[in-house]
Image (cartoon, coloured by chain):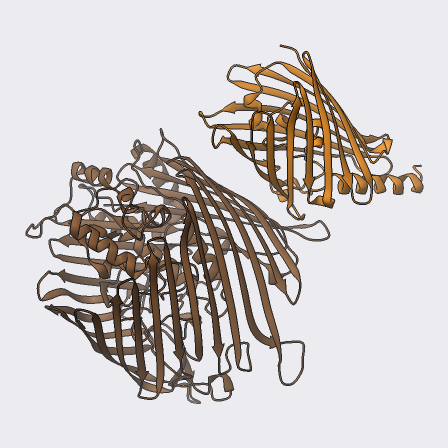
């Protein structure tokens, strides 16, 4: 196996300093055999070897390498919003998984691949087209600051993009070259306070990733074990989660071929979308994109990908994607009287198998999916059609006793047919998609994006998912993860009101014609948000936002038939961020929330400090937060910087403080160590305090 | 034996002192000039504010001393006497402060040693070690705390400054007793050569956020008038200041919705 040498490696980092958070590091002397040795050692005798490893790392440490790493506001805004969504508990986790993937595989904007550019989910289709057109006309972008001068872009958008993009063209590897790039990232995450006696395995979380790129070919392998899980399970013994792929990318008829695990999206995602749901934030300008996208799968969500083969072919203006997948996924079984699995009651999506009962859900079901997408670009319109079929090895059985589930899918075969269109005329783009499953249930999405000037962008999206619409691997735009029983309209705009002043706002009204979770009657929800950003200089950022939420739930106080109760919350947020230089940032934030009908109030004041030392390869994040809420209804969510491939968005309730300090230590070209200590203190009315603390430790090693 | 009447009166004053100060009664904000601007002081460069926000000590490079007396609501038992000194020490400055609140049956003493220094052209930082003792006569224990407070000041531009300050970030579980923590963030701007305006937000453990705004205007040479407002008890403030050679005299007043007026007078001597 050939490895990069240090000189090339340093050169790559120099070129990328400040643009890619987690650029992969390459070393030339270490081999995978050593990695497995390290994994074994630390898996079975971690405590004894920890001190030795730390001492070893101290000896190796004498240099730093640049990674611009900070708490990007778009990340925290969306993550907190998703964490607060009661009807989609996994949304924040999926989002951050996607975010990790985006950091790890930044978008190479100079390749002008609009499908790849659309991975920057906060960009609108106009911006994607504008950026691709600009590069076609003027050549490669050489600095991120150049992007701000492109029509449709501004300083704020560039700031959002910068951690997720790369300006490299071809990784320095010619298409004919046989040079090989390889990378490996290994994480150990230890949470001493969270050990549970019911755990089947060690409390360590282990993640290993490996990738090889040779010209147009690439291959990758990902393996993961969550805290409390066994590293090897099943018979024969296999890693708890193992994902691998090989892919070929071309410019001719064959655009891409993937064997192994892959991620796929057709159109707006109502039929097939294993990536992130679009339109998740009201004020995000990238409201909706309508593109087919086939990519190798490199994330660690254990149930949200395809396993098999896929090909993307293009002839002139026509494009075809074909795929076949056969994957084992988790589910909750229904047992017959003789303890035989007769059906499944639901899919189990968290991917956690650290207890005996959860392990029984692992790989319970074989899901076979195949299909194709055909699209054609006319001069004025792009049209597409796709078809897919899903077969489940065990039928899905709905709970007939609950009227909420009366329209739910039942059986083991789901056929999806979909057509979509996308047309641009001047400054207006109109798009839409219609999907039907099993010729019964319909999903309709139609929208328009209007750009009256370079400083104003307006989006409108209407959607309707009939009761019982089912797409096991779909994630269309909408308010809930299931995307059924929903009809709504959403609009937003973003406007550069003056130099350095940006205003964006959005409003959404959704009706639910049938019963849903915690709501035993047809209901509706409303949400609105307005956000002002003032960026007087590169060093200063003022932000104010107000959001309003209204939803209907069962009134628990009544007996018999549930009454109707409207839940309302209003959240104000002020934020001041000061960045004196590229190595420091100070953020002050105030949140004020009111919740009705309880009438309770919640507020917090927090201070974040980020500093990267110049002389030693150490980066520090510090947060001190005081909060006071009158009840659980007015709880507040705060996104925290955390270990890689881990996240923390604590819900703060009561009177108290939440603080943490995290230190990252870059160890030459070898790896990094992260240590996070956090504590939460809640003071009771009596004056007594509840104190919880946690220590997290992570090693990341590159070879 | 200490009488029940005196004990109950003592506790009444404890409550009054806490409610009158607002927020955290242990986080000392002193100085008549600061009182006049509605206690907007974490970013206001001055002698007394250097003890509320030690990062400002970096800008006080002269040897100076000051005394302050504050009387709350015209009740002698709620008076606070404070004395402080600042010593320049190279690029840094050191400070010492002592404060006494109360009367023989209930006393709260505070002593602090502080240091502030510039970290770069636009950033300065400071820290103060605090010692508190609270004495209630009778069968009650004397309470003693040691904690610290720290902050940083940022020159956003030639005319604007922002400050963050944390008082007592130590978890109470370590101390085994409750000492509230306070986080303050504020910004000031020099609207002209003679007009300063500032605002700050403060939150203490178990308390609501307090927003304060204030201004200081040099109405004549060496003569200042001040005003301010705090959301805590909807309190308005005003004050005056005069520089007489090397001595500065300040008067400050603030109102309380129900309890009346708090007055404060301070003298600051610039020795060298």
The vertical placement of A629 against A315, above or below, is above
Question: Splitting the image into 4 quarters, where does residue A250 fall?
Answer: bottom left
Q: Is residue B262 visible?
A: yes
- What residue is shown at x 82% (from left), y 42% (from top)? B259
Q: Residue at x 73, y 36 (%)?
A: B237
Q: Which is nearer the eye, A234 or A308?
A: A308
Vertical side of A701 occupied by A479: above or below: below
Q: Nearer the viewer, residue A414 or B231?
A: B231
Q: How many marks?
A: 0
What residue is rendered at 44% in x and 57% in y?
A79
Q: Position of residue B172 (x, y in %)?
A: 64, 43
Residue A666 rendering spot, x and y as whole percentages: 33, 38
Q: Quadrant of the N terminus of chain B?
A: top right
Q: Nearer the viewer, residue B113 or B222?
A: B222
Drawn side of residue B69 relative to residue A662, left or right: right
Is residue A530 depicted above or below A361 in this figure?
A: above
Q: Between residues A171 and A10, which one lies in front from this camera angle?
A: A171
Of all chains in the rendering, the one displayed in brown is: A
Q: Is residue B38 visible?
A: no
Q: Is residue A234 above or below residue A29?
A: below
Residue A368 is situated, as x and y percent measured from the top left of the image, at 25, 78
Left or right side of A137 for A91: right
Q: Is residue A417 left or right of residue B230?
A: left
Chain displayed in orange: B
* Figure quadrant of residue A115: bottom left
Residue B39 appears in which quarter of the rendering?
Answer: top right
Q: Residue furthest left?
A: A176
Picture quarter with the C terminus of chain B: top right
Q: Position of residue A443 (x, y in %)?
A: 35, 79
């Amino acid at each position: 196996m050939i490895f990069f040498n240090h000189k090339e490696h340093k050169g790559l980092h120099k070129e990328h300093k400040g643009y890619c958070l987690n650029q992969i590091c390459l070393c030339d002397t270490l081999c995978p055999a050593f990695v497995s040795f390290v994994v074994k050692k630390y898996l079975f005798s971690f405590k004894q070897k920890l001190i030795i490893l730390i001492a070893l790392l101290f000896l190796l440490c004498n240099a730093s390498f640049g990674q611009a790493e900070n708490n990007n506001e778009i990340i925290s805004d969306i993550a907190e919003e998703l964490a607060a969504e009661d009807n989609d508990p996994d949304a924040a986790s999926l989002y951050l998984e996607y975010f990790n993937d985006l950091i790890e595989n930044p978008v190479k904007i100079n390749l002008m691949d609009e499908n790849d550019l659309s991975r920057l989910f906060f960009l609108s289709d106009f911006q994607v087209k504008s950026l691709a057109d600009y590069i076609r006309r003027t050549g490669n972008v050489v600095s991120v600051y150049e992007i701000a001068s492109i029509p449709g872009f501004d300083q704020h958008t560039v700031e959002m993009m910068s951690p997720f993009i790369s300006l490299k063209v071809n990784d320095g590897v010619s298409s004919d070259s046989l040079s090989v790039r390889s990378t490996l990232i290994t994480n150990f995450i230890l949470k001493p306070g969270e050990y549970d006696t019911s755990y089947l395995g060690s409390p360590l979380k282990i993640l290993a990733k490996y990738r090889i790129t040779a010209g147009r070919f690439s291959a990758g392998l990902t393996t993961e074990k969550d805290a409390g899980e066994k590293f090897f399970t099943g018979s024969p013994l296999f890693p708890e989660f193992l994902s691998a792929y090989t892919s070929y990318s071309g410019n001719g008829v064959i655009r891409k071929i993937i064997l192994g695990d892959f991620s796929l999206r057709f159109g707006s995602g109502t039929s097939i979308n294993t990536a992130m749901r679009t339109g998740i934030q009201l004020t995000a300008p990238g409201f909706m994109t309508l593109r087919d996208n086939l990519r190798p799968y490199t994330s660690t969500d254990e149930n949200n990908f395809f396993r098999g083969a896929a090909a993307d072919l293009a002839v002139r203006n026509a494009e075809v994607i074909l795929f076949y997948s056969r994957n084992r996924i988790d589910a909750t079984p229904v047992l017959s009287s003789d303890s035989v699995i007769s059906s499944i009651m639901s899919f189990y999506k968290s991917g956690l198998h650290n207890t005996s009962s959860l392990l029984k859900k692992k790989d319970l079901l074989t899901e076979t999916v195949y299909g194709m997408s055909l699209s054609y670009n006319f001069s004025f319109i792009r049209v597409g059609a796709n078809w897919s079929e899903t077969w489940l090895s065990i039928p899905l059985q709905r709970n007939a006793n609950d009227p909420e589930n009366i329209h739910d899918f039942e059986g083991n075969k789901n056929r999806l047919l979909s057509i979509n269109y996308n047309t641009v005329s001047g400054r207006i783009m109109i798009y839409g998609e219609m999907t039907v499953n099993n010729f019964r249930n319909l999903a309709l999405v139609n929208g328009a994006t209007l750009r009256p000037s370079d400083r104003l962008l307006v989006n409108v999206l209407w959607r309707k998912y009939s009761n019982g619409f089912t797409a096991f691997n779909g994630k269309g735009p909408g308010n809930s993860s299931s995307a059924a029983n929903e009809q709504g309209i959403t609009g937003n705009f973003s406007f550069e009101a003056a130099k350095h002043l940006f205003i964006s706002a959005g409003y959404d009204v959704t009706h639910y014609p049938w019963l849903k979770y915690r709501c035993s009657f047809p209901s509706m929800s409303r949400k609105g948000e307005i956000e002002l950003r003032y960026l007087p200089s590169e060093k200063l950022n003022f932000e104010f936002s107000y959001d309003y939420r209204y939803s209907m739930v069962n009134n628990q106080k009544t007996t018999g038939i549930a009454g109707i109760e409207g839940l309302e919350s209003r959240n104000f947020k002020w934020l001041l961020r000061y960045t004196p230089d590229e190595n420091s940032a100070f953020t002050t934030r105030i949140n004020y929330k009111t919740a009705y009908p309880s009438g309770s109030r919640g507020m917090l004041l927090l201070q974040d400090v980020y500093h990267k030392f110049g002389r030693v390869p150490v980066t520090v994040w510090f947060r001190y937060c005081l909060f006071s809420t009158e009840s659980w209804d007015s709880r507040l969510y705060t996104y925290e910087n955390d270990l890689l491939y881990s996240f923390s968005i604590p819900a703060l309730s009561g009177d108290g403080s939440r603080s943490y300090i995290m230190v990252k230590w870059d160890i030459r070209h070898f790896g990094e160590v992260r240590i996070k200590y956090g504590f939460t203190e809640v003071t009771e009315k009596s004056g007594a305090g509840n104190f919880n603390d946690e220590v997290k430790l992570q090693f990341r090693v590159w070879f | 034996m200490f009488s029940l009447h005196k004990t109950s009166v003592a506790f009444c004053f404890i409550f009054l002192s806490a409610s009158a100060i607002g927020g955290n009664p242990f986080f000392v904000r002193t100085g008549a000039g600061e009182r006049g601007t509605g206690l907007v002081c974490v970013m206001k460069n001055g002698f007394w504010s250097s003890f509320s926000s030690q990062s400002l000590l970096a800008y006080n490079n002269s040897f100076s001393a000051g005394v302050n007396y504050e009387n709350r609501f015209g009740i002698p038992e709620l008076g606070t006497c404070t004395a402080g000194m600042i010593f320049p020490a190279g690029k840094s400055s050191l400070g010492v402060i002592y404060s006494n609140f109360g009367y023989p049956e209930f006393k709260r003493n505070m002593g602090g040693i502080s240091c502030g220094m510039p970290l770069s052209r636009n950033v300065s930082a400071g820290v103060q070690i605090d010692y508190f003792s609270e004495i209630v006569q009778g069968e009650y224990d004397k309470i003693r705390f040691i904690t610290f407070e720290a902050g940083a000041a940022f020159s956003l531009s030639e005319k604007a400054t922002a400050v963050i300050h944390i008082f007592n970030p130590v978890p109470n579980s370590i101390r085994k007793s409750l000492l509230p923590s306070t986080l303050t963030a504020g910004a000031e701007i020099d609207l002209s050569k003679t007009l300063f305006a500032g605002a700050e937000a403060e939150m203490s453990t178990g308390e609501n956020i307090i927003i304060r705004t204030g201004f200081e205007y040099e109405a004549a040479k060496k003569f200042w008038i001040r005003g301010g407002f705090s959301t805590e008890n909807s309190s308005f403030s005003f004050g005056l200041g005069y520089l007489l050679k090397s001595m500065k005299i300040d008067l400050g007043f603030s109102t309380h919705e129900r309890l009346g007026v708090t007055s404060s007078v301070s003298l600051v001597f610039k020795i060298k």
